[in-house]
Amino acid sequence: MTAVVVTHAVGDFEQWLKAGNRERLFPKFCSSYRLFKHADGKSVSVVAEGVDLAKMQALLSTPEGAAAKAEDTVIDPIEVYIEVEGGK
């Protein structure tokens, strides 16, 4: 399990923020997460802790994951940064 930062643009920040998909789906692959927005409100980052990378990738490739992405107005590309173990 590791920490991951996911960054992407959103079509509608308020819709992304209020959609309940994170609360429903993220516990399936991480222990906790924090949300950040770019100052322009058009891009967001999620810092997820205790991530099972295989479960995250599997969930994002399902129809359920695709539907959540659409509802949350996520715009590709989605950039994923994986914590470097031992990196300081």
Image (cartoon, helix red, strand yellow):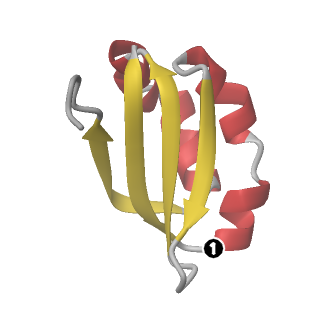
Is any part of residue 61 visible from this angle?
Answer: no
Q: How many marks?
A: 1
**Where the C terminus falls, by quadrant?**
top left
Residue positioned 59% across, 16% down in the render: 28
Q: Position of residue 83 (x, y in %)?
A: 29, 33
Q: Residue furthest bottom?
A: 40
Asked if 82 appears above or below 14 in the picture, the reply is above
Q: Is residue 58 left or right of residue 67?
A: left
- Relative image position of residue 21 (x, y in whole percent): 69, 39
Residue 39 location in percent, x, y? 54, 82
When asked about the image quadrant of residue 41, the answer is: bottom right
Disc 1: which residue: 12
Q: Secondary structure at mark 1?
A: loop
Q: Label 1: few (<14), some or many (≥20) within 10 Å?
A: some
Residue at the (48%, 56%) spot, across then down: 45
Q: Quadrant of the N terminus?
A: top left
Residue at the spot x=40%, y=56% of the render?
7
Task: Report x, y in % for residue 47.
Answer: 50, 43
> Which residue is at 43% across, 31% downward?
60
Near-viewer residue (52 or 25): 52
Image position of 60 (left or right of 28): left
18, 64: nearer the viewer? 18
Identify which residue, 62 or 18, lies in the foreground: 18
Q: Nearer the viewer, residue 31 or 15?
A: 31
Indicate the amino acid at tag 1: Asp
Vertical side of 55 occupied by 45: above or below: below
Q: Residue furthest front?
A: 88
- Residue 45 visible: yes
On screen, residue 28 above or below 61:
above
